[in-house]
Amino acid sequence: MESINDLPDEMLVKILSSFPTFKETIRTSLISKRWQDLWKLVPVFNLNDNLVDDYDDDGESFKSFVYRCFLFSKAQVLERLCLKLLLPYYKSSIINDWVKTGVTRSVKELQLNMCGNNLQLPSCLGRCRTLETLKLQGLKLKVLPQFFRLPSVKTLHLLSVKFPSDESVESLLSSCPVLENLVVNKKEDDNVVIFNISVPTLRSLTINNSEGVRTNNAEIHGFVIKAPSLVYLNIKDTFSNFIMFEYMPEVIKANIEVVCDQSEKFIGSLTSIQHLSLCSRTSKIPYHRGSFFFYLEHLELRTSYAGWWNLLYHILEDAPRLKSLKLDKSKHTSSCDIGKITLSKVVPKCSLTHLEILEWRSYKGTNQEMNVAKYILKNATCLKKATFSTRYKNKNGGILLKLKSTYRVSKRCQLVID
């Protein structure tokens, strides 16, 4: 204890800030007289009503607890205010008061978890010039006032938020004029049919639409993304039947896992990309001809859907600087027919000049897969390492023998089988 008390005040305040609830911070005042005032300087409030003992039926104990925290606090600036409200006892006026106190103290990050309850975003947020991060979770968002704005919010998380309509999504996003980072975890069976993300300042976008059971049977439902400044894209969507990206010339890294079969509506929008991880159903023409992936250096392609070879060959043709290729089926249990493959006599330029790394996971050694492997090994003149991971090497030694005997045009290529 003496060694802890020897730490400077700034360090002790940081330690207190890491505690899961503000209530635990208060308890530390019993450790030493020196700590009695330190907890009042903590710039982080994590207030969770299910962690307060002996609250009565209408939540009065918790309300009093929150007011005492704000009253005793001496922190001039709040780094984070987190309200997790499980009980249905909080009127809008009470939440407005708590948020307003955070705004008065120049709060930088606000988290609101309403556990399924309705919420009207407090109007005082429109006057807050310090709020940079807003995280909304488990709530039913009411219609925003016409002139509502979040002038300084750069990071917005929408986690299981239920919107009243498609227009409500657009209203919220348009209220954030400097938004750079957006995270969307779509709620089950919400009212939004087309989730329209039109944010000219957006730099990073993460979408997860793969949890729970959807009962929305609309003919068209999904996402339209218009973000011309986007740099990083991460989307996992196993429910939508419609996804469209408008031209995004700045994207350098994307991880896309979708089941809709309209790959031509988004792959051609990623021409500036350097790192691409892709799992998608494709048509005969996986993207519009004329798309050119000049900057693409690292490609990971899931081989779970029929036609993946057609998609791969098109990208190889249009990505002359590709250095690393990873093929992977391990994250999917379903099997698919690779379909009839045609191996062109015209070798993609990247195979002749740049491709150095090949990694193939869950390789089964079927005739079609073997033909693809032979094609790459035969033509990749710069290949340095080719790794094949298979679960069947002990059951079928022929897989190993065929790979080892396959001709490799690159004499320095190291063949690894695990």
Image: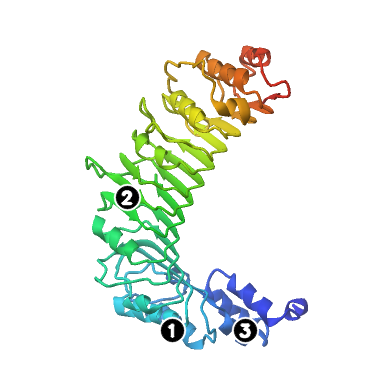
Spatial CA distance of label 2 from label 3 is: 43 Å
Q: Residue at x 38, y 66 (%)?
A: 177
| Between marks 2 and 1 in the image, the one whose residue lies nearer the viewer | 1
Q: Pick whichever, 355 or 1, lies toward us.
A: 355
Residue 246 in the image: x percent, y percent?
Answer: 35, 46
Spatial CA distance of label 1 from label 3 is: 21 Å
In the picture, the disc for residue 104 is 1
Q: Pick whichever, 181 or 330, lies toward us.
A: 181
Q: Amino acid at mark 1?
A: Thr
Q: Amino acid at mark 2?
A: Glu
Decide if residue 240 is in sight here.
no
Q: Pick whichever, 321 or 2, lies toward us.
A: 321
| Between marks 1 and 3 in the image, the one whose residue lies nearer the viewer | 1
Q: Residue at x 53, y 31 (%)?
A: 330
Spatial CA distance of label 2 from label 1 is: 35 Å
Q: Residues within 10 Å of mark 2 (few under 14, many from 20)?
A: some
Residue 410 in the image: x percent, y percent?
Answer: 69, 21
Q: Amino acid at mark 3?
A: Leu
Residue pointed to by mark 2: 188
Which numbered disc flags the more N-terminal residue, 2 or 3?
Answer: 3
Decide if residue 306 is in sight here.
yes
What quarter of the picture does the N terminus occupy? bottom right
Q: Is residue 236 left or right of residue 274?
A: left
Residue pointed to by mark 3: 38
